[in-house]
Image (cartoon, rainbow, N blue to C red):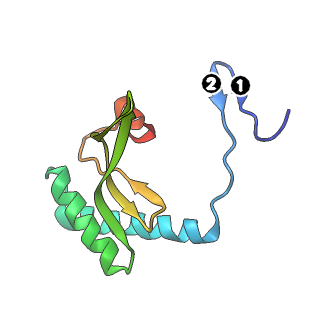
Amino acid sequence: MRSDEPQRHGGTEIIREEALSPSLNSLTGMIVDAAFAVHSTLGAGLLESLYETCLEHELRKRGLHTRRQLVIPVVYDGLRFDEGFRIDLLVEGTVVVEVKAVERLLPVHDAQLLT
């Protein structure tokens, strides 16, 4: 079996992921650090939009380029619909950040990000 083919273990598919490049690993570390800073300062229980705004501010303080509420259009039947998707934050044109202010992540949140 090739290393890039998914393997099955019981009923679960196991996908091997390549290691992150050092630059991407550094970038994601900065994003996680900024997210912890926001959460530590604000605590729990606020609106996602506030966490998103503060996270964008923290990322920019760290010198990172961010775009917020970036529209990803959907083309259906030859028509472009801007109502398709919105990315909460796009950092350095590379990392998509989906901000959640929930007690527990649910499968629907995973599906939202993967879509």
Q: Residue furthest right?
A: 1
Question: Marks 1 and 2, Cα distance to the nearest angstrom?
Answer: 6 Å
Q: Residue at x 15, y 50 (%)?
A: 45
Percent x, y of residue 103: 25, 40
Percent x, y of residue 28: 48, 64
Picture disc at residue 12: 2
Up the image or down, 75 lies above or below 41; here it is above
Residue sitting nearer the eye, 77 or 55: 77
**SS for tag 2?**
strand
Q: Is residue 40 visible?
A: no
**SS for tag 1?**
strand
Q: Quadrant of the C terminus?
A: top left
In the rendered view, does 9 fall on the left or right side of 59? right
In the rendered view, does 87 fall on the left or right side of 95? left
Percent x, y of residue 73: 34, 43
Residues packed near mark 2 inside 10 Å, few (<14), some (14 to 19) or many (20 plus): few
Residues packed near mark 1 inside 10 Å, few (<14), some (14 to 19) or many (20 plus): few
Up the image or down, 24 lies above or below 74; here it is below
Picture disc at residue 8: 1
Q: Residue at x 38, y 60 (%)?
A: 90
Q: Is residue 92 visible?
A: yes
Contact (Cβ within 8 Å) of mark 1 with mark 2: yes
Residue sitting nearer the eye, 83 or 30: 83
Q: Residue at x 63, y 70 (%)?
A: 22
Residue sitting nearer the eye, 65 or 52: 65
